[in-house]
Image (tube, helix red, strand yellow):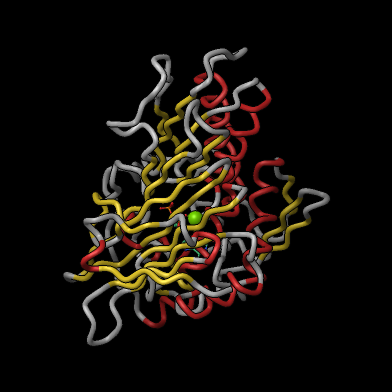
Amino acid sequence: MNRRATISIPLVAVVMALASSPGCDSPADIHRFSFATMGTVAVGTVEVWDKTHKRTPEEIVAAVFDSIDVHLSSWRDDSELALLNAAPADTTINVSRWLADCLQAADSLNRASYGAFDVTAEPLMRLWGFYSGQGHLPTAAELDSTLALLGHYSFDASMRTVTKHLAGTQFDLGAIAKGYAVDRAVADLVDFGISTALIDLGGNIFCLGVPDGRDAWRLGIRDPRNPSAVLATFDAVHKAMATSGAYERYVDIDGRRYGHIMNPATGSPAEGLLSVTVIGRRATMCDGLSTTLFVAGPDEALRLLRDVYRQYDAVLVLPPPAGASKARVLATSGLRGNLTLTDAATPATTLEFLDF
Ligand code: ADP
Ligand code: MG
């Protein structure tokens, strides 16, 4: 089945890298190229600003993104992930380091968020029609029987083994694999002597080093109310960034739009936030944490940022409070003096910095 044709996915990245936008000075020999991986969800670009390197960046990044497809893609019937999903109950499967790394990150996010992040949300995605592209509003009975499939597996990180306890427990790494691919690509680029690059895999960004003559990369966050516009910008050095928002991928059912991030507490798409951007040192965690905070909702997201994930910065976009017209942007204090709303977003947006 071709899952690609029917789902609405914007071709542009979720988060914009503005470093090489018109008006910025860029060296003449900048490399820029794209990869499609994991269906059409992720289109990667890598700008390499170094002038000399031992191996072409195309070769390095193509190798990483190809491996990611082979191991982690839900869009290929022959990926390692697909083989795990097809496995019967109570059969122990050895998994690659790639899959094990993702499952380990997923487990820690799941525990910290009391289940908001769930790497086995696949049956919910399927029920709501995200794989077929045909949206379906589930009945209460369908929700119950599908929720009963989630989470029945054990994972041994040191042995790198997974055992499903129900055949119907199914994994979907859509919230974490692109970030992981970016971290692997960064490590390989560094190994091959590349020290200045901007990597963007479907909105999962890493800015490596600093371009010549600049202090930082200028990154932009999309406006979830108008995804072709920039909401806010900030400067970053050697940082990863990821955004989760319901506007990125959705199904329409009876005139209502349902986003692709599931709340395992209800079985329905998560609501409450318009988007969440996370900035930190590792793209894997930025990817997973942005999804986690989106599911957790505004109050629980603030608790997680304050009590568990203090080393990350985040930008939460909330709908206007009752009776108000401006969307609220809440940013962690590490972004104070750096994050600024764009002129276009300012009239309809308030910006507050958190005090922890
Ligand atoms: P994107 O893939 O657009 O970058 P995210 O990183 O937020 O967005 O990941 C969303 C994807 O994660 C969904 O398309 C689905 O594959 C998977 N997913 C949905 N709900 C959850 C959840 N509660 N926990 C973990 N993964 C989820
Ligand atoms: Mg994510």
> In what quadrant of the picture does the N terminus appear?
top left
Q: Residue furthest right?
A: 158
Q: How many marks?
A: 0
21 left or right of 60? left
320 left or right of 15? left
| Residue 274 percent coordinates (x, y) | 35, 67
Q: Nearer the viewer, residue 260 or 287?
A: 287
| Residue 166 percent coordinates (x, y) | 63, 65
Q: Residue furthest left?
A: 255
* Residue 249 makes an appearance in the image: no
Q: Nearer the viewer, residue 271 or 78?
A: 271
346 left or right of 56? left
Q: Nearer the viewer, residue 249 or 276?
A: 276
Which residue: 66% across, 70% down? 308
Q: In the picture shown, does residue 210 fall above or below 82?
A: above
| Residue 231 percent coordinates (x, y) | 31, 56
Which residue: 62% across, 76% down? 114
> In what quadrant of the picture does the C terminus appear?
bottom right
| Residue 205 percent coordinates (x, y) | 48, 43
Which residue: 38% across, 51% down? 233
* Residue 197 makes an appearance in the image: yes
